[in-house]
Amino acid sequence: MRRFPFLGDTITRRLVVTVALAAGVTLLLLQLFFAFGGTWAKPDVQATGLVQQVATVIRLVDAATPAERARLATAANTDTIHYGWYDAGSAVAGVLERGQYLEPQVAQSRAFLEPFLARKPDRIVVFQEDNPVSRAPGLPYDRIRNPDAYFVGVRLADGSWILGIALQRFWGFSPFERLMLQVVTLALWVIAVSLIASRQLSRPIEHLAESVRQFGHQPPSASIEEVGPREIKLVARTINGMQAEIQRFIEYRTTMLAAISHDLRTPLTRIRLRGEYIDDKWQQANLFRDVDEMQAMIDGALSFFRDDAASEAATVFDLPGLLQTIAYDYSDQGHRVDYHGPNKTCYVGRLYVLKRVFTNLVENSIKYGKVPTIDLEQQDDGSLIVFVRDRGPGIPPEVLPRVFDPYFRVDKSRNRQTGGVGLGLTSAQAIVRSHGGDIVMENREGGGLEVRVLLPAMIQTGRNISGPAHIGHMWGKPAR
Ligand code: ADP
């Protein structure tokens, strides 16, 4: 296979096939051009030798005695051109003298003929079958059989006329017109072939890029489809291998961290037991508080790792419905939460993890602020923004960038009462980023915090769910 890259479905083969096809079709078109092309495929009048032929007959007739001219002209007849000579006083000469002719045609014929004539004729006329002059009686051609005859008349020095009648107009475009026609046809063809060729090559690459982009919205075990030419399949296979490797690595780290967190519980329990023997009650209370805090941190970490390990497939769900449910649930518990926004908007994502994100944000607002509101806005590009706003203390601007860091809490003493360990926002940000979106926080004018959750438009394709790739993410891992 490797020695004959064009045998399998490879980029080389696609390229070779496209170029070969292009060359083949070009040749075929050229053949068709000459076989079926009308006037335009034929050589132009100068290339046919017609002009020289007519000029030679004119010179011969001009040189002959008047008595011989008529016979000589008739003798010069060929299958394609007939000649006639008409005395100065003849009816045909009179008609030719009085006829109306198209000046540009006359000038062009003069330019063609003159170089081949011994003497510049003082009058040259040209006309076609549609000119009344062509109906002069006695002209040597059959109007019915030769409907597109072309006439050239030259007046000789003695006032007599010699008329050449090309029975068919069988010459084509001028060299310039022919060149333009070829250039335009070729350009159109080249554009068409290039489009086909680039499509052939770009489609598998676009498909690969799309599959890689969809990675983030699939369960960790998902792999990208290995389709397209061999080289692209190889890239897909390599990415799949790399993805599996990264996944294994993450799993190993997560399991290890979960095990460490878990194992820390035992010595912590022992510390707590030993604390019972401390006589100094104040020191004992301090120790117990620290132990409780560590316990909470460990529990938080364990639940974070547990969530991370659980893989949930994306589904279509009604986002306003989800937000309203959260609002009702809190209202039921005596915390008023208002929802503003559309009543129904479908979104494709992981329902349960997203529910946890919004619950966490609303819970924070209730904990740190008062009467939170949830607003949902749909943007023109299909993306959705969920605003969770409150009128609480907000977050000091200098620590705002750090609120998503694990275990970060703005005010430790304040948080002690609220019970959080500082993993809620870390986890929320990781989940939203895994949907291709992001979370932004801002202090509101007049006090309080505004949290914006941007969820980009998701496209549900046959088997995959996709979203924009502008925000990097890794399976719900905290992104620093
Ligand atoms: P926690 O579990 O402590 O709530 P989070 O990660 O959810 O942890 O939040 C991190 C910190 O950000 C909180 O400790 C709190 O200080 C601050 N914070 C979060 N939401 C709000 C809010 N709505 N108003 C004021 N401060 C907030």
Image (cartoon, rainbow, N blue to C red):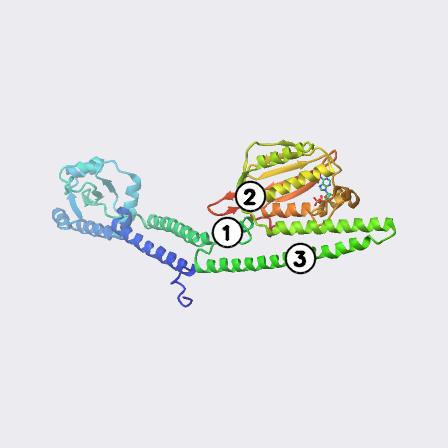
Question: Which circle's residue, 2 or 1, is located before the other in the chain?
Answer: 1
Identity of the amino acid at label 2? Answer: Gly
Q: Residue at x 31, y 41 (%)?
A: 104
- Under circle 3, the secondary element is helix
**Where does residue 349 sit, x and y in percent of width and height?**
55, 43
State how far apart marks 3 and 1 are (Cα): 34 Å
**Where does residue 374 sit, x and y in percent of width and height?**
64, 34
Identify the disc placed on residue 458.
none
Which of the 4 quarters of the picture holds residue 245? bottom right
Q: Residue at x 51, y 43 (%)?
A: 459
Identity of the amino acid at label 1? Answer: Ser
Identify the disc placed on residue 349.
2
The quarter of the picture showing ligand 1:
top right
Judged left or right of residue 113, residue 208 is right
Report whether residue 118 is seen.
Answer: no
Density class for disc 2 (Cα within 10 Å; few <14, some 14-19, many ≥20) is: many
Q: Look at the picture and state if 306 lies above or below 142.
A: below
Question: Which circle's residue, 2 or 3, is located before the other in the chain?
Answer: 3
Identify the disc placed on residue 259.
3
Check disc 1 and report the residue beneath it: 211
Task: Check the picture and name the quadrant holding the N terminus.
Answer: bottom left
State how far apart marks 2 and 3 are (Cα): 30 Å
Identity of the amino acid at label 3? Answer: Ala
Question: Which circle's residue, 3 or 1, is located before the other in the chain?
Answer: 1
State how far apart marks 2 and 1 are (Cα): 17 Å
**Where does residue 265 sit, x and y in percent of width and height?**
72, 54
Judged left or right of residue 330, residue 3 is left
**Where does residue 279 sit, x and y in percent of width and height?**
87, 52
Along the line of sight, which residue is nearer the eye, 192 or 462? 462
